[in-house]
Image: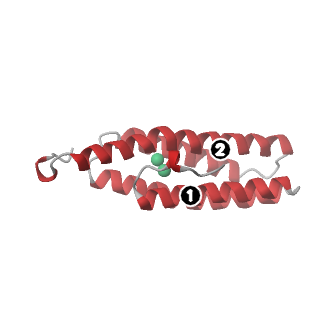
Amino acid sequence: MEWDAAYAIGQSAVDGDHQRLFQLFNQFNAAIAAGETRESANRFLRELADYSAYHFRREEGLMHAIGYPDYAKHKKMHDTFADFVRRQSDSEERDLEEVQFLQSYVEMWLCGHILVMDKWFGEWLDGRAGKSGAAEPIS
Ligand SMILES: [Fe+2]
Ligand SMILES: [Fe+2]
């Protein structure tokens, strides 16, 4: 997964977290390409679970603090992904096909979520910043 400007939502802490998620994913891909499967998948899933929990807390905290109208829907998507990662990291047996499924699913979810859901949040932030500040209601 190559990071480029299309993924930026314009909120530096969130963009930094997303770049770290890309980096984690790329390390996982490199390990798979080098022939590691089960160990690297388990390590990746643990790291992904920890880091995405940290990132989702940050993003949700920001949304909640400023009254983002789609907060509940957005949080639900985070929760569903976090559950998937947690369930996967409990799996003891994993063959190459399952590892490849994991790669595709995580890549698709991260890209899709950032490009659609997180971007909407970025656009909402921009619109809010563009309006004349103090007069703008929070929710
Ligand atoms: Fe998000
Ligand atoms: Fe995000």
Numbered tag placed on residue 106 in the rendering: none
Question: Residue 69 or 46: which is nearer the viewer?
Answer: 69
At x 65% / y 48%, what residue is drawn?
87
Check the image and name the residue furthest to the left: 135
Residue type highlighted by circle 1: Gln
Instruction: Give the mark nearer the N terminus: 1 vs 2.
Output: 1
Residue 131, image quadrant: top left
Q: Quadrant of the C terminus?
A: top left
Some atom of ligand 2 lies within 8 Å of the CB belonging to the residue at label 2: no
Residue position for label 1: 19
Question: Which secondary structure lies at badge 1?
Answer: helix
Does residue 81 appear anywhere in the picture?
Answer: yes
Q: Which residue is pictured at 65% across the width and 44% down the height?
A: 107
Q: Dot 2 surroundings within 10 Å: few (below 14), some, or many (20 or more)?
A: some
Q: Is residue 37 visible?
A: no
Image coords of residue 83 (percent x, y) = 58, 46
Q: Position of residue 106 (x, y in %)?
A: 65, 45
| Residue at which label 2 appears | 107
Q: Residue at x 82, y 49 (%)?
A: 93
Rendering coords of residue 104 (x, y %): 71, 40
> Is residue 91 rendered to the left or right of residue 115?
right
The answer for how far apart the CA atoms under marks 1 and 2 are is: 13 Å
